[in-house]
Image (cartoon, rainbow, N blue to C red):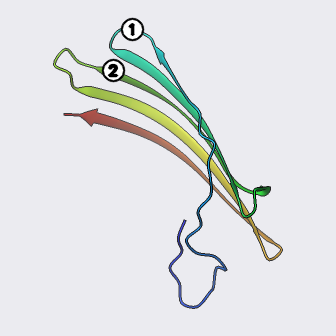
Amino acid sequence: MTTFSSGSAFGFKNLMAPQINPVLTYGLTQRTQLNAYIKLAPLFEFKLDNREIAAGVGLSTSTFKGRTFGLGLDYSALTLNLAGSEVKSTNTVLGGWFGF
Protein backbone atom coordinates (compact mmCIF):
# COMPACT_ATOMS: atom_id res chain seq x y z
CA MET A 1 0.00 0.00 0.00
CA THR A 2 1.34 3.41 -0.90
CA THR A 3 -0.15 6.77 0.00
CA PHE A 4 0.37 9.98 -1.93
CA SER A 5 0.09 13.11 0.22
CA SER A 6 2.09 16.17 1.06
CA GLY A 7 4.23 15.79 4.16
CA SER A 8 3.44 12.78 6.32
CA ALA A 9 -0.32 13.21 6.74
CA PHE A 10 -0.97 9.46 6.91
CA GLY A 11 2.12 8.38 8.83
CA PHE A 12 3.15 5.57 6.49
CA LYS A 13 4.06 4.85 2.88
CA ASN A 14 5.24 1.91 0.79
CA LEU A 15 3.70 -0.59 3.19
CA MET A 16 4.83 -4.14 2.43
CA ALA A 17 4.50 -7.34 4.44
CA PRO A 18 4.73 -11.11 4.04
CA GLN A 19 1.52 -12.94 3.26
CA ILE A 20 0.13 -16.37 3.99
CA ASN A 21 -2.06 -17.16 1.00
CA PRO A 22 -3.15 -20.81 0.51
CA VAL A 23 -5.20 -21.55 -2.61
CA LEU A 24 -7.37 -24.60 -3.22
CA THR A 25 -8.53 -25.72 -6.66
CA TYR A 26 -11.08 -28.48 -7.21
CA GLY A 27 -11.93 -29.83 -10.64
CA LEU A 28 -15.70 -30.19 -10.97
CA THR A 29 -15.47 -31.47 -14.55
CA GLN A 30 -12.69 -31.75 -17.10
CA ARG A 31 -13.18 -28.07 -18.07
CA THR A 32 -14.66 -26.49 -14.91
CA GLN A 33 -12.80 -25.61 -11.70
CA LEU A 34 -13.81 -24.24 -8.32
CA ASN A 35 -11.14 -22.08 -6.64
CA ALA A 36 -10.93 -20.75 -3.08
CA TYR A 37 -8.30 -18.81 -1.16
CA ILE A 38 -7.67 -17.15 2.16
CA LYS A 39 -5.01 -14.56 2.93
CA LEU A 40 -3.50 -13.27 6.15
CA ALA A 41 -1.01 -10.42 5.97
CA PRO A 42 0.23 -9.18 9.35
CA LEU A 43 1.58 -5.63 9.15
CA PHE A 44 4.08 -3.74 11.30
CA GLU A 45 6.18 -6.26 13.20
CA PHE A 46 3.76 -9.17 12.67
CA LYS A 47 1.16 -7.87 15.15
CA LEU A 48 -2.33 -9.15 14.33
CA ASP A 49 -4.01 -5.91 15.38
CA ASN A 50 -2.54 -4.48 12.15
CA ARG A 51 -3.50 -6.86 9.38
CA GLU A 52 -5.27 -7.64 6.16
CA ILE A 53 -7.53 -10.68 6.03
CA ALA A 54 -9.05 -11.74 2.73
CA ALA A 55 -10.96 -14.65 1.22
CA GLY A 56 -12.46 -15.46 -2.13
CA VAL A 57 -14.13 -18.08 -4.27
CA GLY A 58 -14.32 -18.44 -8.02
CA LEU A 59 -15.72 -20.69 -10.69
CA SER A 60 -13.96 -20.93 -14.05
CA THR A 61 -14.62 -22.97 -17.15
CA SER A 62 -13.27 -23.28 -20.65
CA THR A 63 -15.03 -23.69 -23.97
CA PHE A 64 -14.24 -26.31 -26.59
CA LYS A 65 -12.10 -23.71 -28.39
CA GLY A 66 -9.95 -23.14 -25.28
CA ARG A 67 -11.35 -19.78 -24.20
CA THR A 68 -11.86 -19.37 -20.46
CA PHE A 69 -14.43 -17.43 -18.50
CA GLY A 70 -15.47 -17.26 -14.90
CA LEU A 71 -17.05 -15.51 -11.97
CA GLY A 72 -15.49 -14.69 -8.60
CA LEU A 73 -16.40 -13.19 -5.22
CA ASP A 74 -13.70 -11.64 -3.00
CA TYR A 75 -13.80 -10.05 0.46
CA SER A 76 -11.01 -8.24 2.29
CA ALA A 77 -10.70 -6.42 5.61
CA LEU A 78 -7.78 -4.15 6.46
CA THR A 79 -7.21 -2.95 10.04
CA LEU A 80 -4.48 -0.47 11.01
CA ASN A 81 -3.80 1.03 14.44
CA LEU A 82 -1.83 4.23 13.88
CA ALA A 83 -0.90 6.51 16.77
CA GLY A 84 -3.87 5.34 18.83
CA SER A 85 -6.39 5.66 16.00
CA GLU A 86 -7.92 2.60 14.35
CA VAL A 87 -8.47 2.67 10.60
CA LYS A 88 -10.61 -0.03 8.97
CA SER A 89 -11.40 -0.71 5.35
CA THR A 90 -13.50 -3.54 3.95
CA ASN A 91 -14.10 -4.45 0.31
CA THR A 92 -16.39 -6.94 -1.36
CA VAL A 93 -15.95 -7.49 -5.09
CA LEU A 94 -17.99 -9.57 -7.53
CA GLY A 95 -16.08 -9.93 -10.77
CA GLY A 96 -16.00 -11.84 -14.00
CA TRP A 97 -13.41 -12.56 -16.64
CA PHE A 98 -13.08 -13.81 -20.17
CA GLY A 99 -9.86 -15.08 -21.74
CA PHE A 100 -9.11 -15.00 -25.47
Q: Which residue is mark 1?
A: 29
Helix, strand or loop for disc 1: loop
In percent of the image, x 47 and y 21: which residue is there? 34
- Which badge, 2 or 1, comes first in the chain's sequence? 1
In percent of the image, x 37 and y 36: which residue is there? 96
The amino acid type of the residue labelled 2 equals: Thr
Q: Quadrant of the C terminus?
A: top left
Where residue 65 appears, x then y in whole percent? 16, 19
Q: Are marks 2 and 1 in contact (CB under 8 Å)?
A: yes
Q: Which circle marks residue 61 in the picture?
A: 2
11 vs 17: above or below: below
In percent of the image, x 24 and y 34: which residue is there? 99
**Nearest to the observer: residue 72 or residue 28:** 28
Q: Is residue 52 left or right of residue 60?
A: right
Q: CA distance from mark 2 to mark 1?
A: 9 Å
The amino acid type of the residue labelled 1 equals: Thr
**Nearest to the observer: residue 92 or residue 50:** 50
Q: Which circle marks residue 42 in the picture?
A: none
Name which quarter of the figure residue 67 lies in.
Answer: top left
Q: Residue furthest right?
A: 84
